[in-house]
């Protein structure tokens, strides 16, 4: 603990979750699953209808980037910054092609 506090800089996990407010349905499953308590409820006003609600917001200073909130989000409103669904699918496709090439050799 002393080593952590005596350092000039705090090294953190570079990956943190981010919520797309206009996609969030306010179920707060992400808040329940987060082991770090990084999900907060914040007010949100829909720009089209003016309707007010609470939505989830991830505190990047607390988030450890575990991805649990991403997994439970039904409307897919939460992403790990730097790892969108499209990026993950692309990585899987590349890896599956590598495996197929090795199997053929």
Image (cartoon, grey):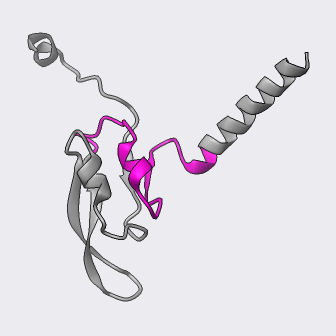
Q: Which residue is depicted at the point 24% across and 40% down? A: 35
Q: Residue furthest top?
A: 3
Residue farthest to the left, as pictured: 2
- Seen in the picture, residue 66 relative to 78 is either above or below; the reply is above
Whether residue 64 sits left or right of residue 103 in the image: it is: left
Outermost residue toward the right in this view: 105
Is 56 above or below relative to 100? below
27 part of magenta stretch: no
68 lies above or below 100:
below
Q: Residue at x 21, y 56 (%)?
A: 40
The prevailing secondary structure element of the residues shown in magenta is: loop
User: Which of 40/35 is in front?
Assistant: 35
- What residue span does the magenta drawing correspond to? 60-87
The image position of residue 36, as x and y in percent, is 22, 39
Quadrant in the picture for the C terminus: top right
96 left or right of 71 in image: right
Seen at 21% across and 65% down, the residue is 42
Q: Looking at the image, can residue 8 be seen?
A: yes
Residue that protrudes farthest toward the bottom in the picture: 49
Residue 58 visible in the picture: no
- Residue 95 in the image: state x and y as whole percent: 71, 29
Q: Quadrant of the N terminus?
A: top left
Which of the two residues, 56 or 99, is positioned nearer the viewer here?
99
In the visual, does 18 lie left or right of 93? left
Residue 70's spot in the image, x, y percent? 42, 49
Residue shown at the point (16%, 16%) measured from the top left = 4
Q: Quadrant of residue 51?
A: bottom left
Q: Position of residue 71 (x, y in %)?
A: 43, 48
Count how many numbered circles sit on residues in the image: 0
Which quarter of the figure has residue 90?
top right
């Amino acid at each position: 603990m002393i080593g952590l506090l005596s350092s000039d800089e705090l090294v953190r996990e570079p990956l943190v979750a981010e919520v797309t407010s206009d996609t969030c349905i306010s179920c707060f499953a992400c808040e329940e699953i987060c082991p770090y308590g990084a999900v907060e409820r914040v007010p949100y006003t829909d720009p089209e209808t003016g309707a007010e609600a609470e939505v989830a917001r991830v505190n990047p200073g607390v988030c450890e980037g575990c991805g649990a909130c991403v997994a439970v989000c039904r409307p897919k409103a939460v992403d790990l910054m730097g790892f969108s669904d499209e990026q993950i699918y692309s990585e899987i496709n590349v890896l599956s092609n590598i495996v197929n090439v090795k199997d053929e050799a």
